[in-house]
Amino acid sequence: MTTEFPKNFFWGAASSATQSEGREPHDGKGENIWDYSSKEFNFRFYDGVTTEHTSYFYQDYKEDIQRMKEIGFNSFRTSISWSRLFPDGVGELNQKGVDFYNQMIDELLAQGIEPFINLYHFDMPIKLQEIGGFENREVIQAYADYARTCFELFGDRVNYWFTFNEPMIPAEAGYLHDRHYPYVVDFKRAAAVLHHIVLAHCEAVKIYREMKLSGKIGIIMDVIPVYPRSQHPADLEAAEMADLFYTKSINDAILKGKYPDKLKSVLLEYDQLPEVTTTDTALIASTKIDLLGINYYRPRRVKAKECLPNPQGVFSPEWFFDNYEMPGRRMNTSRGIEIYPKGIYDIAKKIQNEYGNIDWFVSENGIGIQEEEQFMENGIVQDDYRIDFLKEHLTYLNLAMKEGANCLGYHMWTFVDCWSWGNAYKNRYGFYRLDTETGEKTCKKSGHWFKKLTENHGFE
Ligand code: BG6
């Protein structure tokens, strides 16, 4: 093997409840912001597909887990849907939801697949959104109660817990960039949401520790490595600001126990600081995680600003940098993002050098392709581009590991083509193809390749 991984490396994929479970009549699930917005703001979703018709994991979980086994998974991440467990976000439990997650976890374990369970993947129960979602401090308590219930119900069997997937996104996409419901555009409110998510994370970790469960708890971050256009001081400053707002803000809070001083002074200067009490600061400082997940899709290239920001415009991190389109960059044109495999190595080095070389794993990485059926031959999607993508990223990851990175596993996004926030079923990411008309799931060429990879613990 030229690229060899440890025998106990975690191999698998990630998914999330809202993106894969779908709905069944009388399943007892309450609505979350996606059930609501994909109906009420249907025009914002590709082809108008709603959450009702996601990849049928609620019905097919047994067969799906068998499919995972067939392509060599030893681990799988999904999330619990808060509104499936608590239809109103708080109060009465939905027993059908409890049964479903119990059966799903038991089935994974029976098939030798380690469940990695995440508590929040962008899916605020609508009842709690009606009182402000994470903008409202009361919701932190509701989340803590939900987390405690999950640990009580499933903590005897689940050894790997994650509090949030990409904590920056609900704040940034929901309160600044108009991509997720409630489609607010207001930096200070976004900052409050992010801060409250950090506190909710800390509360869940605290509860987990108090319960003295034997597993590990962590969080999943989307770390976008930032590259300046040049070494000119103005470009370097732009890169520093992009990193400060979008990565260091959350990374430092979670991994170093405090927000960066420079960020605080910039927000103070522009009157954008959310309320942070001394109790909050102490809680953040005392919270430590065991395991970090890193989602990596693309780099962020930036340059110094060409024009001053609109003086009437909404305060935003983009006041300090412009995005830079590097000539010759390699693009995934379906998704409109750059492919840069070395980014995974750069992240690994950052974790190693700046964040104490904590145990981590690649919790998402993948390539979403539109109209993938064009690559179908004899009923199988010949996704050689996905195999190449995997090989290139794994080669860089392997190099970082040889240099001491504590990476424990690699999860692809995703197991079977799934619904996504806004893009619905436009871009396909799965090892299995989903026929959205018939619900049929067929293994792609990359799934077969992945099986060999896991059997050989590497590839030539
Ligand atoms: C990740 C999210 O950021 O990106 C997933 O955790 C999401 O939920 C994935 O589906 C791919 O994004 P998209 O929008 O291309 O489907």
Image (cartoon, rainbow, N blue to C red):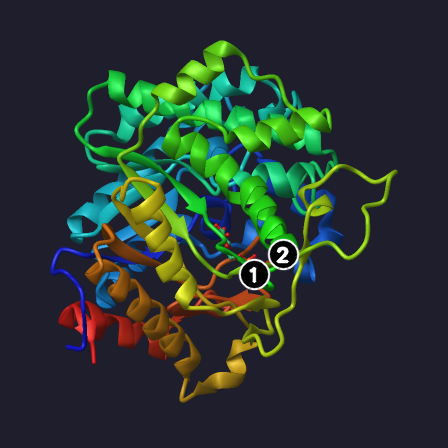
Q: Is residue 363 above or below residue 1?
A: above
Which residue is at a point 27% across and 41% down the rendered structure image? 358
Which residue is at a point 60% across and 42% down the rendered structure image? 34
Q: Which type of secondary structure does the marked residue at label 1 adopt?
A: loop
Which residue is at a point 34% across and 27% down the rendered structure image? 150
Q: Residue furthest bottom?
A: 378
How many numbered dots are placed on residues in this image?
2
Q: Is residue 234 visible?
A: yes
- Location of residue 431 in the rendering, given as x and y in whole percent from the top left corner: 37, 68
- Location of residue 245 in the rendering, given as x and y in whole percent from the top left corner: 58, 40
Q: Which type of secondary structure does the marked residue at label 2 adopt?
A: helix
User: Which amino acid, by three-letter code, is at mark 1?
Assistant: Gln
Q: Is residue 420 above or below residue 243?
A: below
User: Which amino acid, by three-letter code, is at mark 2?
Assistant: Asp
Q: Residue furthest right?
A: 312
Between 41 and 262, the residue placed more toward the observer is 262
Q: Quick check: is the Cβ at mark 1 less than 8 Å away from ligand 1?
A: no
The numbered dot on residue 424 is: none
- Dots 1, 2 in contact, CB < 8 A: yes
Between 271 and 2, the residue placed more toward the observer is 271
**Image quadrant assignment for residue 426:** bottom right
**Image quadrant assignment for residue 393:** bottom left
Question: In the image, 255: left or right of 311?
Answer: left
Q: Residue furthest front?
A: 233
Between 30 and 243, the residue placed more toward the observer is 243
Q: Is residue 165 above or below residue 412?
A: above
Say which residue label 2 marks: 235
Q: Is residue 91 visible?
A: no
Say which residue label 1 marks: 231
Between 413 and 320, the residue placed more toward the observer is 320
Which residue is at a point 51% across and 28% down the rendered structure image? 197
